[in-house]
Amino acid sequence: MAALPFELTPVIAALPFVSFLIALLVGAFAPRVLPKGGAIPGILATAGSLALSVWAFVAVHNDPDGVYHEYITWVAGYGDATLDLHFGVLVDPLSAMMLVIVSLVALLVHVFSLGYMNDEGETGLPRYYAGLGLFTASMLAFVFADNLLMAFMFFELVGLCSWLLIGFWFREEGPPSAAKKAFLVTRFGDYFFLVGVVGVLATFGTSMFVGSESLQSFPAIAEQVLAGEAGAEVTTYLGFDPQTWFAILGLLILGGVIGKSAQFPLHTWLPDAMEGPTPVSALIHAATMVAAGVYLVARIYGFYALLPQVMALIAFVGGFTALFAATMGVVKKEIKQVLAYSTISQYGYMMLGLGAGGYVAATFHLMTHAFFKALLFLGAGSVIIAMHHNENMWDMGGLKEKMPVTYYAFLSGSLALAGIVPFSGFWSKDEVLYEALIHGLGNPLLLGAYAMGLLAVFFTGFYTFRMVALTFHGDARSDTAEDPHGVRWNVKAPLAVLGVLAAVAGLVNMVPVQKLLGVEGIDFLHQWLDAGPEALSAHHYGDLIPYSSGVIGSEATTVLLGAGLSLALALAGAGLAWRLYAVPDPDEHTDKLGGVKTVLFNNYYQDEYQVWLAQGVTLPLARVADKFDQGVIDGVVDGVSSVSLFGGSRLKRIQTGVVSNYAFLLTTGLVVLLVAFGLMGGWF
Amino acid sequence: MVPIEYYLLLSAAVFCIGLFGILTRKNALLFLMSVELLLNAAAVNFVAFSRFHGNLTGQTFTLFVLALAAAEVAIGIGIVLVLYRNFADVDVTRATTMRW
């Protein structure tokens, strides 16, 4: 067993943490010594993490078991009813893949930041790089966490870092408010997650993701209990049977996922989070914060696969979010806003894939999305540098000739996002939809989710190419677009790397080709996720999922139909956008939407109703609670103290200072005492 | 031999006189005298019971009471002197600055 790279796994997260400490401490005490405001330590640390992650990835591949799991106990239970809390490292195919993705994107974002932050003369760079380092470190630790509690801790750290980075320009008005919103909205979901974690620990006595010799994993226990195996015992609460109780736990954990992965109805923080620096947006959307939610579901997929209702709900919420966010992306004016809604929409697809039983498909989409969304954000960042930090697409136009590297990289990402063959997004999105279709044929809820996902493909194609056309094509519509600011290698290099990846990453899992042409063995990702420990493997999940799969005609027809339909819709959307906006002087065309336009511009009044919920419902409730607290609780406490104060103020008057009075009191006291003793002692 | 009840009556009478003096007088010197009466009432009791039981412990105690009374008077006179210096009087009801 290749022990070395595995034993270095904690270092993967420790390196960015060290860069965080360096940026923070050196930046505070000796900022002149810090090279490039902390960028160099950050780049070195993330490059080290990437190298170690790749090494671990290769080692997982070569390892006969395909897994490394090691943990320490930091809280040991007392007595017989032991409940131990652990910190551990779990490297299996899924986490090894995610480690590579996260560290790669983090490295590229650090390099890009040289161009976006350093070259633009930003101040407070040590703070920025400290934030990036901590962000990367906590996400990496979250990825290799081996139990739910540890995952929760780093999940929260990720949320904290997003707050720090979104609010980086805290002297302006927008960013602090957006940061607070992101923090509060995701915290709202995390409350449920926290209750879920406690629930899992109380129910199963462990929150391990993977079993070891001494300790079973909680999905395995749940599986045994539901299968009615002897010796499998859990404690359920509130009188629910295990199936219902597990579903409740699953929903509680899902609360955190919905908050972090910006699913309806907790998606409202994400578009506002665009107030942060663009490289941070790339990191948040592609590899860290938002990915954390979906990754968590994939991590404990063995648990969710046991719960049909929860699975259907995940799929439905995912499909709905995909469509819902895509329609809002259609009317946005700012390039980063379009990308924000596309992120929500794409994570909707991942949730749809997971809920529909497509574990590999969703993980695949998580991977390709990480590449093309990081690319699109960095491309948008490059455009924003060129446009002197004007993000309005209606002021752009004609940037194609002036910044060809950005254009071609951005185009690669856009084709992937829109799902045009053979770019990466096509393969992954198609597989998600295919899984939803074959499993949905026997399940109307899932079929509805599939229909929404399919419809969203059209809107995705439309908003993506509307964005490309408005930004890069046509005539320049402002003076800055006429003469854009140049960008340097540190912007172009990450774009080039990601541009290539966005184009070719889909080739790792060409399932439709395999099914149509019968070429065996090109579904590398399926094989990859099938290796590793039995309980975490894709075929085990395939056995668990509560759906039957159907086909239309034969399997080949279904594949062809699904792929053809989504490709046709994507092309139709892209073509329509191209026709409307890839002209020298495009119109907005939004007036044709009529009343829908207002609704879309206002994001379906989501913010309004949530603000109303807060102000119209929660605030009065809080006032009542406050009145109760101030009046009743505090009233009792204050009453007690005022009684003793009043009593004391009266009683102190017997301290007259006159010795005769004291003598009188002494004598009276003695007499009273004697009489009392006498009465009780029966002297009289 | 005088019966013990007479001694006890004498002792009680002296004690009551002393107590009456403490409760009614204002003059600090009279206070001191009243306290002496209280102590001596107790001392009489000691001696009487000592003799009644044929045991010398009570009489020994009386010696201690006398010594204590002497010490008490020394301190008491000291207090009275300080009282006089501060208030130009020995009236205990006037020295009320230490009250609430």
Image (tube, coloured by chain):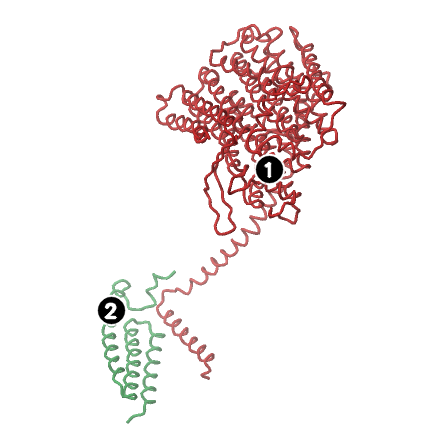
Could you say where residue A257 lies in the image, as x and y percent from the top left? 59, 33
Quadrant position of residue A648:
bottom left
Relative to B95, A184 lies left or right: right
**Is B89 above or below relative to A470?**
below
**Is A659 above or below relative to A503?**
below
**Chain colored red:** A
Amino acid marked by disc 2: Ile
Q: Which residue is mark 2?
A: B75
- Tell me the chain of label 2: B
Mark 1 touches mark 2? (CB < 8 Å): no
Q: Which residue is mark 1?
A: A253
Q: Is residue A676 visible?
A: yes
From this viewpoint, which residue is outermost toward the right?
Answer: A553
**Chain colored green:** B
Q: Is residue A271 visible?
A: no
**Residue lying at 51% horizontally and 23% vertically, measured from the top left:** A280
Amino acid marked by disc 1: Ile
